[in-house]
């Protein structure tokens, strides 16, 4: 087990912990630490650029108009605080299972059980949304091909990637992210060039910043519209916590995790606020239909040669990247749950490549649900799935914040070494972020179209409580100590 103190050998002794060149423990027979600094930085970068931006942003724009930019900034600030809290814990305890094990250690085994399984549920539901979007994107080129065929194809591809060495996953994410980042930067520059040329969307109108205020004002639907967009906006950030999951396979988590997390504000400003600002400056917000990615729709409407097909290829890349990341995150969390006695022990077995192969297969099997959804209810699937995923996402973030607060209190009470990657503005920002998460949950229950997400979410927590009481025994109800790597690894250069 990799929960902290090594288990006694057969003769009652303890095998010394073996560390790599960075001072990080190497787990014999466990996950391979094959993710480099480059991999983790791009995994973190790619996590913020996915289906929520390329497809879900259309729904958010329809609800809030240009004021959705403020919603992304506010939600992004709260998400950054969650990531800093997770980063502080991940640098202190770079272990598989990440925040699932942190919750178990600092809040109790039941909290760890709820956090770990809720995150797994979140990744499955988000992946379903991503494969749904993938089918929609492919329909841009092949409108007569049933959507479920594309879903089945991408599931097989992702399964093949995630059963190989973790370096294969890291390399795929690296190159997919390069495509996404390059495309968004090109789109922003191209959009600015179109505005300077005075390209018009329709006769009598022109592209420019005035489109952010001329069509009903900056907040055409008022505060209510901004609040209504929260579910989709928060969904867009779902998955950024995967950075914490990589700590268990990072060669040098002390350097990689802080660098990836500290880039979150820049990603939010560049890839959401600036990119969507350009989109709504090119085309009036009320002309964005949501039938396709707003990026594809806009450049198609403006008559840019080949741009729609190019952008469609980019959003397909984003969807594949998101599904790949979702599968990785869910598989590693199931591995950590198995180590804690919160999931079948078989999930803790690894292949010769150091990959938890069974958890990957289970994740791919769950994604088959996406093919069924696309076959029997292809209309409005995305919004329903996004709202359910939002509840699971917010629950996980809430537990991360609570775990971090409990850890900070324990550090102060027991006089332990101060963290090397501390949360800023402690404790005000942490408690403010908790309040924000509660508000998002209340928003889900307020609006009829997202109320089902709150109902499903509450039912899910009740189901977990029943499962915990019936099936988790012995080791699963034990608080495991976690190895504290504070000031033990090589310092950040």
Image (spheres, rainbow, N blue to C red):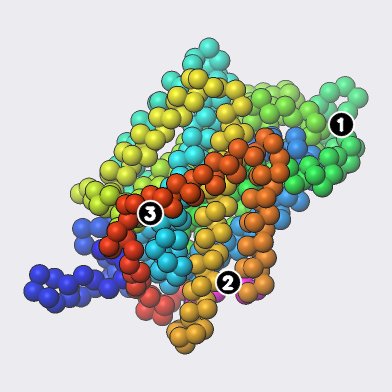
Q: Is residue 59 visible?
A: yes
Q: Which residue is mark 3?
A: 468
The answer to whether the residues at label 3 and label 2 have Cβ atoms under 8 Å apart is no
Q: Residue at x 41, y 43 (%)?
A: 327
Q: Which residue is mark 2?
A: 423
Residue furthest toward the left?
A: 11
Q: Residue at x 55, y 22 (%)?
A: 378
User: Range of the magenta residues?
Assistant: 419-426
Q: Position of residue 192 (x, y in %)?
A: 76, 40
Relative to 173, residue 249 above or below: below
Q: Is residue 197 visible?
A: no
The residue mark sitting in front, 3 or 2, is 3
Q: Assess disc 1: are there few (<14), some (14-19) or many (≥20) residues with their C-alpha within 10 Å of its C-alpha.
A: some
Magenta-colored stretch includes residue 49: no
Determine the image quadrant of residue 108.
bottom left
Image disc number at residue 109: none
Image disc number at residue 206: 1
Which of the two residues, 157 or 338, is positioned nearer the viewer here?
338
The residue mark sitting in front, 2 or 1, is 2
Residue furthest toward the top?
A: 144
């Amino acid at each position: 087990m990799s929960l902290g103190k090594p288990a006694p050998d057969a003769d009652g002794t303890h095998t010394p912990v073996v560390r790599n060149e960075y001072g990080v423990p190497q787990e014999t027979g466990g996950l391979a630490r094959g993710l480099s600094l480059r991999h983790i930085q791009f995994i973190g970068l790619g996590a913020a650029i996915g289906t929520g931006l390329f497809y879900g942003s259309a729904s958010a724009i329809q609800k809030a108009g240009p004021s959705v930019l403020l919603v992304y900034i506010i939600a992004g600030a709260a998400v950054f605080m969650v990531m800093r809290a997770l980063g502080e814990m991940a640098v202190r305890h770079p272990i598989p299972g990440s925040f699932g094990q942190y919750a178990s250690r600092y809040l109790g085994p039941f909290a760890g059980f709820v956090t770990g399984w809720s995150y797994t549920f979140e990744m499955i539901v988000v992946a379903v949304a991503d494969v749904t979007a993938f089918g929609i994107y492919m329909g841009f080129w092949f409108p007569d091909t049933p959507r479920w065929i594309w879903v089945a194809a991408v599931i097989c591809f992702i399964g093949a990637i995630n059963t190989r060495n973790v370096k294969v996953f890291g390399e795929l994410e690296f190159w997919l992210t390069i495509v996404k980042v390059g495309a968004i930067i090109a789109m922003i520059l191209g959009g600015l060039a179109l505005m300077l040329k005075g390209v018009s969307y329709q006769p009598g109108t022109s592209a420019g910043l005035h489109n952010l205020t001329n069509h009903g004002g900056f907040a055409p639907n008022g505060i209510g519209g901004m609040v209504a967009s929260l579910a989709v906006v928060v969904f867009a950030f779902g998955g950024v916590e995967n950075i914490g999951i990589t700590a268990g396979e990072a060669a040098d988590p002390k350097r990689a995790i802080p660098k990836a997390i500290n880039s979150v504000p820049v990603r939010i400003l560049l890839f959401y606020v600036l990119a969507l600002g350009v989109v709504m400056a090119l085309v009036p917000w009320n002309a964005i239909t949501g039938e396709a990615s707003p990026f594809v729709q806009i450049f198609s409407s403006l008559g840019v040669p080949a741009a729609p097909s190019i952008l469609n290829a980019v959003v397909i890349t984003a969807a594949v990247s998101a599904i790949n990341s979702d599968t990785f995150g869910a598989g590693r969390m199931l591995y950590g749950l198995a180590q804690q006695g919160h999931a079948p022990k078989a999930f803790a077995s690894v292949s010769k490549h150091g990959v938890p192969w069974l958890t990957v297969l289970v994740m791919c099997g769950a994604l088959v649900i996406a093919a069924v959804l696309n076959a029997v209810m292809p209309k409005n699937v995305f919004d329903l799935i996004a709202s359910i995923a939002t509840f699971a996402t917010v629950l996980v973030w809430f537990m991360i914040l609570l775990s971090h607060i409990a850890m900070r209190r324990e550090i102060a009470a027991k006089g332990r070494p101060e963290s090397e990657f501390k949360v800023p503005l402690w404790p005000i920002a942490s408690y403010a972020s908790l309040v924000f998460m509660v508000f998002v949950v209340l928003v889900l229950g307020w609006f009829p179209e997202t109320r089902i997400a709150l109902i499903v979410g509450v039912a899910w927590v009740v189901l977990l409580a029943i499962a915990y009481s019936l099936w988790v025994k012995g080791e699963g109800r034990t608080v495991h100590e976690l190895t504290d790597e504070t000031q033990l690894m090589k310092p950040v250069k």
